[in-house]
Image: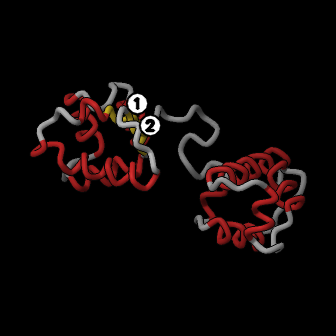
Amino acid sequence: MSSEYAKQLGAKLRAIRTQQGLSLHGVEEKSQGRWKAVVVGSYERGDRAVTVQRLAELADFYGVPVQELLPGSTPGGAAEPPPKLVLDLERLAHVPADKAGPLQRYAATIQSQRGDYNGKVLSIRQDDLRTLAVIYDQSPSVLTEQLISWGVLDADARRAVAHEDA
């Protein structure tokens, strides 16, 4: 395994761990000592080669597919991340319920799950947009245009969707 590949793999491992809100010691605690903090840290720095077997076990521990841990497996791995999708909840409140009802309910559910009740904006993920597109029976790009026309999404959201389509 090349040094550069090991570092990219390590960056993916670190990203997954931090997304889950775990410190290196948190991994050791959660795994009841199965994964030593020093070993996981050395994988993340690219100082130590990880076997395919251990990588599969780590993926299982984190609850992600192995391919999510491999460098180059997701769009934008080393590139600039796509713009965030931010719903303007204040504007959403003014869109007629017959149009925005499913989106309002979906946003309320996300707020409830996150305990996020600021009421002004709500960040959503690409997966959320794809789910909403299914609910609205539209493609993500068509739904994005509709949400922009309602004033609920910023026009920058087009770049996020274009990034997904690429």
Residue 62 shows in this picture: yes
Is residue 16 positioned above or below 157 on the image?
below
Residue 59: mark: none
Q: Label 2 vs label 1: CA separation?
A: 6 Å
Q: Residue at x 44, y 45 (%)?
A: 116
Q: Residues within 10 Å of mark 2 (few under 14, many from 20)?
A: some
Question: Which quadrant holds the C terminus?
Answer: top left
Residue where numbered disc 2 is placed: 163
Residue located 61% across and 43% down the image: 77
In this rendering, the count of numbered labels is 2
Q: Residue at x 11, y 38 (%)?
A: 96
Q: Which residue ends up furthest to the top in the rendered image?
A: 155
Rendering colour mode: secondary structure
Residue 123 figure quarter? top left
Q: Which sits in the foreground, 86 or 89?
A: 89
The amino acid at mark 1 is Arg
In what element is the residue under mark 2? helix
Specify whether 144 is left or right of 57. left
Question: Is the Cβ of the residue at disc 2 closer than 8 Å to that at disc 1?
Answer: yes
Estimate the x, y position of residue 107 in percent, counting from the top left: 32, 47
* Along the viewing direction, whichever of 6 and 32 lies nearer the viewer: 32
Q: Position of residue 151 (x, y in %)?
A: 24, 27
Res 159 label? 1
